[in-house]
Image: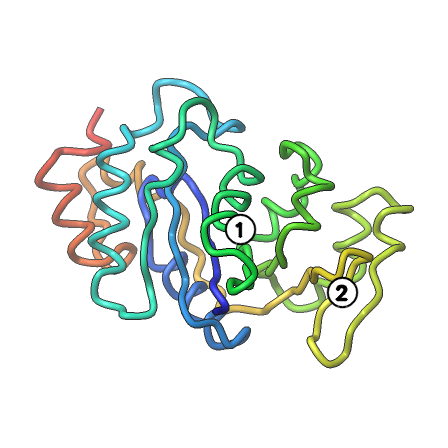
Amino acid sequence: MRWGLMGGTFDPIHLAHLRGAQEILEHCGLDRVVFIPSASPPLKHGPGITPYEHRERMVRLAVEGNPAFAYSDVENRREGRSYTVDTIGYFRETFGEELEIFFILGQDAFLDIRRWKDWRRLLTLCHFVVMSRPGWGRGTLRKALPEAYAARYAYDRRTRGYRGPAGTLISFAQVTALDIGATDIRERARSGRSIRYLVPDEVREYIETHGLYRG
């Protein structure tokens, strides 16, 4: 099994998330992409984050029409902060060697990787697929990781990624550039402007029905 795991606050999930996941699914030959809403994101604090139950429900509505998409509430079932290294560990322990994991993230998140808990161990637990713009590759690797650590990764032409000493890959995959952001969507909803065509219709209707982001 080859699964992509896409974590995030998803506040709200939007079309750029979904389109990027679909393209990574095809690019990496994945069997499934699992969306994992963060229950308590360690790098985002404060009362401004929408309660988990709303964010999870929006993710479920967004993915239910695609048989290759799924969601997991694993981070809500675990106490404390939602650390990716613990989530990857859960999937490895649950599914064992049968499952090959590709963690999907954006380029800005990857550049921040050294702030993540146990990031060195995390990079040995699964492959990383970075949704990126043209020209991102070895230079980005050196920006994100310490120079000596980045030097341990060698380009693997067959897999189109950089393979580390543990055998895991860091790949940079160009996806369709959709300039959609959750912050902008929240601001539009807050001011009463339309968010149609930025999120799936089911998500838009949920936001409107529950009065999310209205302050």
Question: Residue 126, position in %: x, y?
Answer: 62, 55
At x 32%, y 58%, the residue is 70
124 horizontally vs 131: left or right: right
In the image, residue 199 above or below residue 66:
above
Mark 1 and mark 2: span between their CA atoms? 22 Å
Q: Nearer the viewer, residue 33 or 214?
A: 33
Q: Nearer the viewer, residue 10 or 207?
A: 10
In the image, residue 159 above or below residue 189:
below
At x 83%, y 59%, the residue is 153
Q: Residue furthest bottom?
A: 158
At x 23%, y 51%, the residue is 60
Q: Nearer the viewer, residue 184 or 116?
A: 116
- Quarter of the image for the C terminus: give it: top left
The residue type indicated by label 1 comes to: Arg
Question: Residue 137, position in %: x, y?
Answer: 74, 63
| Quadrant in which residue 184 is drawn | top left
> Which residue carries the number 1 mark?
92
46 horizontally vs 207: left or right: right
At x 23%, y 46%, the residue is 58
The local secondary structure at tag 2 comes to: strand
The residue type indicated by label 2 comes to: Tyr
Q: Which mark is residue 162?
A: 2
- Visual colour scheme: rainbow
Question: Residue 71, position in %: x, y?
Answer: 32, 52
78 horizontally vs 55: left or right: right
Q: Which mark is residue 75?
A: none
For label 1, the crowd category at 10 Å Cα-Cα, with few meaning under 14, some 14 to 19 and many 20 or more, is: some
Question: Residue 144, position in %: x, y?
Answer: 74, 46
The local secondary structure at tag 1 comes to: helix
For label 2, the crowd category at 10 Å Cα-Cα, with few meaning under 14, some 14 to 19 and many 20 or more, is: many
